[in-house]
Image: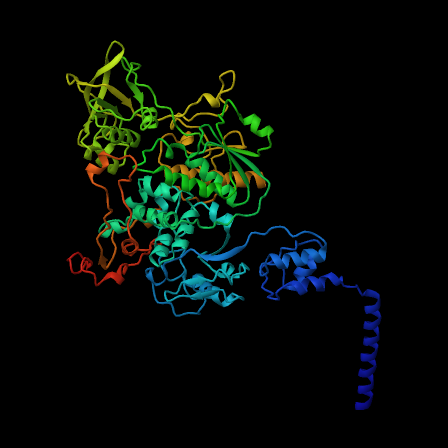
Amino acid sequence: MVTSSIMVLFLLGLTAAAILAAASRVLHVEEDPRIAKVEGCFPGANCGGCGYPGCSAAAGAIVEGKASPEVCVAGGAEIAENIAAIMGVEAAFKEPKVANNICTGGSRANLLFEYEGVEDCRAEALLYGGEKTCGLGCIGLGSCVKVCGFDAIRLNDDGIPVVDMNACRSCGKCADVCPTGAIRISGMTMDLLHLNQIDDCLAPCMQKCPAQIDVRTYINQMKNGDMRGALLTMKERNPLPLAVGRLCPAPCETICRRNIADDGVAIHTLHRFVADWEMNSGSRLKLDCNPSTGHKVAIIGGGPAGLSCAYFLRRIGHEPVIFEKRDHIGGMMKGIIPEYRLPAKVVDWEVQSILDLGVDVHTGVEFGKDITIDSLENDGYEAIFIATGAWKVPALEIENADAEGVLDSITFLEEVGKSITNLKGKKVVVIGDSNTAMDVVRSAARLNCEVTSLVGCIQRKMAANKSEVIRATELGSELKYLTEPTRIIAKDGKVCGIEYREVQYDDPAKALGIPKPVEGTEAVIDADIVITATSRVIDTIPFEGKDGSPILTVSKKTGGLDADSLSLQTKRPNVFVGGEVHTGRSIIIQAVADGRRAARGIHHFITEGVIPELENPQLRVIPESILKNMDVTYTIPRIKIPEITIEERRSTFKEEVKGSIVYEAARKEGSRCLRCGLTCYDSEAGAEYAQDADVKTFAELGKV
């Protein structure tokens, strides 16, 4: 019985083996030998980052033409080239990408409860929604560390993932398991062109900055001695840190959370300090640029917006060409803004850093005459960015506005040091409340004349920065607030005086609305020169056709060219605009921001044909990030910036009013930064200076 059973099973096995052997001969498919060769090129990580279940499957996909030789995320360019050689093709450039962590909160975020469940971020997020009050912060249980096959992530003492950029292979597993999006995969193009979104970890200063500069990161890098890293962080958003560090009115400082506790961080000063570090070192920081894509972009105007756009386009691989009307580039930074605010040598250094990336420039070329949109299209430019600025100063609409001795602010500033070198004994009246007006006042005062400024509002309503107003009055100039000119008095066609009157708000206490004339307040002052600095507007003539019809529409609200607010694309799809030609008179950091936004729009337009819409862009300050109270331990005095004396200012146009600071002072100011996240902050900021005599605790001051 047993013997017969064994024989039956043996015969069945033998029969099955024979059938399988026959089937294998019939159904056998010879494997392409290239699959093994391609798989042999891979590092063998089987990470799945390529989207295929293992290296063997990825190799098969390459041989079948379903994947490119660059598909392996764990391998580099050399591996891609080896695979391409096997396949008889050329390897294309693949921009490297790495994981990065947007959360800085860690244990500093407020805890909702003590979690004692499974040590997995996904489980905690699924069961409890996470333990911290910040919905996009890192949960801190290290699921990303566990899934990384390259030992590229570790948790620091605060429970925050730290990515080793050299070890990361961008497989994406860490991002896949992160339930809050705190870990993300990005590359240079994504980093340079990313626009703030609501689900980013944005400190208030980052939200308020038009250029969206990562303030907390570069301050922390500077504080830790990583000057190169700090500058690279700044240049992800701002290619003109030297100029911005001198001219920006620093809206970021007005919203700094430190203001709740004592005084806001001197962000603007630290920005300049980091930028000056590079220039003072005598060598330029090497910036990576992607290989050329062959896409040509024309940029009309070599001011801050045009330079910014060219910088970002070049770094991501495109070929921008700047066309400039004047014989040099830099816009108003060069030759208009006085050197005691922004020296020409600083502008030259900054501009050269951008040109060295491979940006071509053609000067002496006027838009609307020498080149047009149509001519540039015919020359092969796939997109055009117009950034011609707002150089036109509206004439006064009063009697004798065209008399000899009446100048506009731009002409005056451009001629200072050239045809205008000394105004000793002259009486100058400046009309306007802008930063340009204060530049005129300060420059005229340096030329040994008596200066009076007619300002049509109260001081806090002036368009000029408060510091610029103070600088103007320090030189002895008189600012007559709530006044307006009524007529210019001329004799033999030359200015000899100006009549003005007082104006007032309907509700002086609230100072709302437009001030109205006060009857019976007319007065006259002597004047040899009247300088108009009321505003600056764009020249619309280049944007009109031969029949006078508009080529591009002008906004009634801003006086600038109309365009989409995020992409800066006009009604003509291949034409983009930015800077003051779009916004009207504005600040330098806005022009820089426009250049980057335009670069993003242009990049998508010329590579994809369409510009993707952002689902949740951060367009205004996020309400939940504005805290009313904070528990901060240490108070450290805000840094004092050295300045040349008032007497020294009277005798020089070349020396900057504000001086430089030393590293230790910058480091101490940087320690005041709370390293804010969306809602979290470092309450122990500045602890390393606790022993300094000028550092106190709020408890000691009785302010807890």
Residue in front for this viewpoint, 156 or 480? 480
Evaluate whether residue 391 shows in this view.
Answer: yes
Q: Is residue 496 left or right of residue 114?
A: left
Image quarter where the C terminus lies is bottom left
Coloration of the structure image? rainbow
Foreground of the two, 386 or 427: 427
Please tell me whether residue 219 is drawn above or below residue 444 in the rendered image: below
Q: Would you say 376 lies left or right of 530 here?
A: right
Give residue 287's position: percent from left, percent from top.
Answer: 48, 49
* Residue 124, quarter of the rendered image: bottom left
Residue in front for this viewpoint, 460 or 411:
411
Rendered location of residue 298, percent (x, y) = 53, 33
What residue is at 23 percent from the left and 23 percent from the top? 428
Note whether 338 is above or below 664 in the view shown.
above
Q: Which of 73 and 666 is in front in this view?
A: 666
User: Is 277 situated above or below 407?
Assistant: below
Q: In this view, does 71 lie to the left or right of 549?
A: right
Q: How many marks overall?
A: 0
Residue 77: % across, % down: 60, 56
In which quarter of the view is residue 448 placed? top left
In which quadrant of the rendered image does the N terminus lie?
bottom right
**In the figure, is residue 694 to the left or right of 209?**
left
Q: Which residue is drawn at 73% across and 61% down?
A: 34
Residue 1 visible in the shown view: no
Q: Is residue 530 above or below residue 122?
A: above
Residue 543 in percent (x, y) is at 48, 23
